Amino acid sequence: MARAMFLLAAAMVGLSVLLPGGAKIAFANGVPQLVKLEYLPGVSNWGPEDAEGLLEFSFAEGYAIVDVKRIPATEGTTFEGWMRTEAGDAVHIGDIVTDATGIGHLEAKLTGLSRFDYTQFLVAARTDNDAAGAIPAQISIAGNFSVIGDEPGDGDDGEQRPQVLPDTGELPGGSGPGRGFMAMIAMAATGLTIVMVAQYRKRRRA
């Protein structure tokens, strides 16, 4: 049952990429963001290619939760979660402890961050050969995301992105009843996903 719930949650997140215009699940005002983690060509270079996971996080609420599967514990290797910007700057989120079956979990507080323009989450495998304080060279699974209006604070520093785009007099791409219907489906799927993930984690702790 737990496996089915995990797969359903991942499938719901994956559904978002099918929306017109390549829409992603990204919310404002503290609503958690869900990011599917998988073996990404051009990014991943280590470990099982069928490994997968799910990241739930919110900068406004200051937390991150990661669940992974098919990343078995390896002697001499520790697994870490990292967020990275498009410019390559990164922050260590925490260590992910996995068991012999490849199931792993991480719960971390996102405190003391000096920036919020991260666009990628990485699960990396650290060995003794990796430099301290930097992303290990071995990247397992990863996921891309965009953050819109989820930063804490009131935006007085001028760094927050605008919530409404300027009116150019043209209809936005993909607008119309069809896009609205798909957006409703995505919102419903996201709500169901959050509920399923919460139930899954509650049963794990029981």
Image: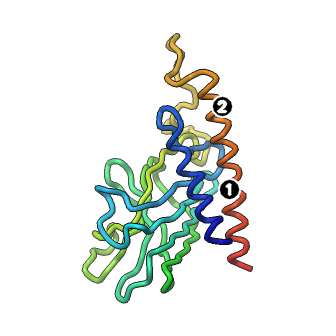
Q: Is residue 110 above or below residue 165?
A: below
At a point 53% along the width and 31% down the height, the residue shown is 162
Q: Is residue 99 above or below residue 180?
A: below
Instruction: Tell which circle, 2 or 1, labels the residue nearer the N-terminal end.
Output: 2
Eye-nearest disc, 2 or 1: 2
Residue indicated by mark 2: 181
Image location of residue 64, percent across then percent down = 57, 62
| Badge 1: residue crowd in 10 Å (few <14, some 14–19, many ≥20) | some
Residue type at tag 1 = Ile
Residue type at tag 2 = Phe
Residue at the extreme top of the image, as rendered: 169
Image location of residue 74, percent across then percent down = 39, 85
Q: Is residue 129 left or right of residue 24?
A: left
Dot 2 falls on a residue whose secondary structure is helix
Give me the C-alpha separation between circle 2 and circle 1. Answer: 20 Å
Q: Nearer the viewer, residue 18 or 104?
A: 18
At a point 56% along the width and 44% down the height, the residue shown is 26
Q: Is residue 159 above or below residue 53?
A: above
Residue indicated by mark 1: 194
Dot 1 falls on a residue whose secondary structure is helix
| Badge 2: residue crowd in 10 Å (few <14, some 14–19, many ≥20) | few
